[in-house]
Image: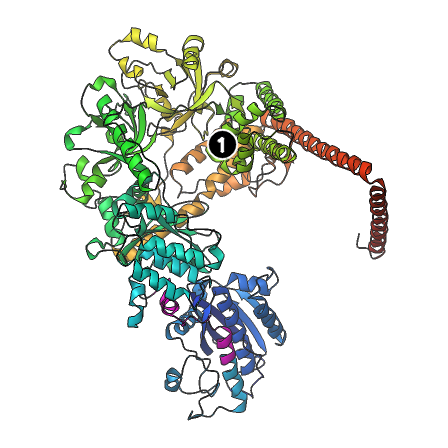
Amino acid sequence: APEPLQQSSANPLIDPSKLYALYFDGASKGNPGESGAGIVLYDAEGDADKEVWSGYQYLGRRTNNEAEYIALLTGMQCAQYLGVQKLSVKGDSDLVVKQQIGEYCCRKDSLRPLYAQCVETGKQFVSFDISHVKRGDNKRADELANIAVATKRSDLGTADIFKTPSASQENDRPMSTSHKDDNQEMQVEAEDTNVEEMEVVAAESAKPLPINEDELCTALSSQCISSEGSPTSSSDEGEDWMSQLPFIVQYELIRSGKNNEIPASKFGADLKEIHKSYKGQPSLAPELIAYIYEQTEAWKEHSAPYVDILRAACNNGITADESNSCLISFHAMLDRDGLHLLPPEPLGLQTRRIHRQFGSHRFLEVRCDPECSLSDIKKHLCSKLYLGGRTYGLLYSKPSDKKQVYRLFAESGTGIARGDELTAHEVAALCIPKELNSDLSLSKYMKRMKLCFTVTTPTLTLTPDMLECIDDIVSPTGNVMTDGCGLVSRDALDAIYSRYIVNREAREALLGGSSSPVPVELRCKHSSFMWRLGGLKGEMILDDRLGPGIKVQYRPSQLKYDVPLTSDKAAIDASSSAYDFLHTIEIKAWDMPPPPAHLSRDIVQILEERGVPKEYFVSLARKEITQLKALRSDEELLLKRYKARKYLRDSKELFDDDMLWRMLTAGVPLNEPVMQRKVNDFISEELQSFREKSRFLVEKSRHLRMFPDVTGLLEPEEAFIAIGDDQSVQYEIERHSTHLVAMRLPSYFKGDLRKLKIVSKSELLQRCPKNSVFFNGITVGLILSTKGDRSQAEMMSGGDFDGDAAWCCWDDDIVSHVSECVAADTSLCDPPVDYFKQRPIKWSEPHWSDSIVDFTWHHKYDNKWLSKLCTALNKLRDIPRYGFDKTNEVATKAFLQVDNPFTKQWTDNDERKYGGLPEPHWNVSSNDGYAKKTYRSVKALGELFDLLEEASTKQQQEIEDEMNIHIQRKIFRAEEKNPAEVNRIREEMKNRLIDFNKTMRKKIGSSERNDEV
């Protein structure tokens, strides 16, 4: 950082009695990377838009935060030198400003000296303050900082103020020198020497590590991640070998080089030698990457996780970053400091549809820190991004209320043949043919593009004669009763399954795994699957009535956008690469026999509303507590319980304790101390899950996907249920259960819980032997009637048959108590106008990226209204004095918010009515920001919470008692061996406790005398 400056003689441009505003900004291209500082001084009491003074400074290789701090310090010292005595500083760095005002602590070693100098310099002004401004209000300082980076020069003043060299001479001067030019025409006065020294010292402190000792480091200095201009390239012929490296190697060099972990002396020569040895061979990339990981200090203990995969692919003549290979994916993190590259990740057995068409290596997934502002995102992602010799454009984003994800496409550059060069919006037009879908709105485009990024496995490529469009079943009132579900023949299902297994085996072999010969034709054990085909999505279910031959029947409700296969408007050459992409059936998931399901807080609340007594839930909780206690002594039960928890997708972080799993499978005794601690932790986590989520197991329940009855055999309030391979349970359902209850999650209305009569296969056979064949082929699923005015799926919070699942329960202890209730008619809820649904997609290049970012950004903030509505809904269900009307009103708004996220349903009136509702004590851990007081709930969730809280306390006490017993046993053994030593330790502990109590009494007495307590 620059040394403090002495104040100059009186300057005609500065009035010491006036207040001046100093704006500062730092820029770093790469973070760390080439950096600069920009400073502007304004007259705060006069013409606020008139610059009194401005300057910029090249800082060399710095992080963004370091550049911001040096810009602040340089600006303050320049203002001091000019004679400013009253200074108000403005900057857009939230970190620097909040550290300077004391709101944040400065803990980073590289920033502490700069932080301290800024604090001390600020104290030297008569009046001084610093505040944060938006980036849009700091454009001039940002412009100057970028000039410093682009020109690699410094200019900290004009001849009128600093009496420094003229502009032309300044441009001819090196960016920084350690001495003055003796032949300089203009001599700098003594007082001005300080300015030159400040510039020199700052440049010296900002100087990057020596990177010109070999060809690698010289090449690294020219690599950058930039969203402005075009990528730089070296003109040194000796560095040509660097530009010939595979993209993945350049990516890793940039990533590791930015951490300053590469030795400068020997690394480049060795890397060049490897390049020469493996020139032109597919194994070049894995060998180079393996060497990088071996030599990089921070990575020595971690070999590249994908090197083995790259080597296996090389054995098959496939490279990771060329053509349409799908081996690895590239990721980056965007925060307020810029873009940070993350380690490449190997892909698994399933890959994204669009990756298989264009190659996974051409996509860069950028995950945004929640603190990123809209301007941060647009600055880095809305213009072209240059990385490792490639040019990237924004293609798609994944809207989220938490961490947003943007996906960029490599349009041209390293490893991309000239014939494969495509812009991002040209890729979008290929995925969703523009000429067939010209009327797409922005909202629909984002939803449709999401289908292209679905993780799937390709199977059978269809010809037009295999695919047929059949009409949806429609009710007399016009409601679609088969929304999202099509049919396949037995031969089609077997062919699809065979290709699925073949492709999975081939994929596993490609990734280095073992593979076994696959029979030409396999009998499919599944009866349904979730699929993608061009612009089609949803569920496909087996219908043995279709007869022999490959027959795939889709419905109009499954078509989300048109492709040549499903459109009469255009055709496509079967030999083109796009044909397979648009016409291949891709499997997202097969139906699988589900395990017994669990309750949730939503289910408990609605079941209680419909008449299930809270004593039933309490009995479930007591049963779970008893079983948890038994885990300490029953190894078989513990293993079964642990397996069940690992199966749950959303409990991976809580229960995926590899150490416990290894100890269980290795047969470690339960009384072993480490094993005891692991088991106790597992029990505590289970109790916490029960307390926070009410996740109680109900043996006679399953989560099942819903399908429409295409035969017309089921009446409106009837259902057929199939749960998989467990024939004993299936037999029990058909023989001993007459009704079931089903609900789709999340549920908003009391009537979302549907009570249906169970119809057996034998009864369906009696109704119509020919059509009952359909039900014989179903292995897993809940089949619902297509008769009536509305489908049962739609009555469950607006569900359909494109993959929606329902919680189904046939336990008589629940079903017998559920009262009848009319389903809420959500079709009567007029959806509000969605701004993005009315806005057509702009296929032109200038507006493409901005539209995507705007859409995603709005989703992030609009989604919070749904959270407020759901919080209010949970409270209304619990507070006894609120009736059905109030609850239904909020439920309707929550339902509308889901399908229309960009239209705010939570009004100011709702804020007044529901924002201040008291919080039930079972939800005190939530932080919705509105509850001002709590109350003790008398509903089922309240009693469950109390019971589990008590059990958790007892569990903790038992753990402590066990620990005390363990400690006492150790003491007894020690006394037997050396009683004198044990007595000495006891006496020493006693004396220390006495001293501690004396000290505390003195402090308490002193505090009372000083009125501090």
Using the rendered image of the protein, determine whether residue 92 is visible from the camera's viewpoint.
no
Magenta region includes residue 523: no
Q: Quadrant of residue 514?
A: top left
Q: Position of residue 757 (x, y in %)?
A: 40, 13
Q: Quadrant of residue 712?
A: top left
Q: How many marks?
A: 1
> On the rendered structure, is 842 left or right of 999?
left
Query: Which range of residues does the magenta coloring cover?
Result: 200-228
For the residue pair 979 and 492, the one nearer the viewer reads as 979
Q: Position of residue 136 (x, y in %)?
A: 43, 64
700 w.r.t. 560: above or below: above
> On the rendered structure, is 670 left or right of 57?
right
Q: Amino acid at mark 1?
A: Lys
Magenta region includes residue 204: yes
Q: Position of residue 464 (x, y in %)?
A: 15, 32
Q: Which residue is mark 1?
A: 646
Looking at the rendering, in which quadrant would you find the N terminus?
bottom right
Using the rendered image of the protein, determine whether residue 647 is visible from the camera's viewpoint.
yes
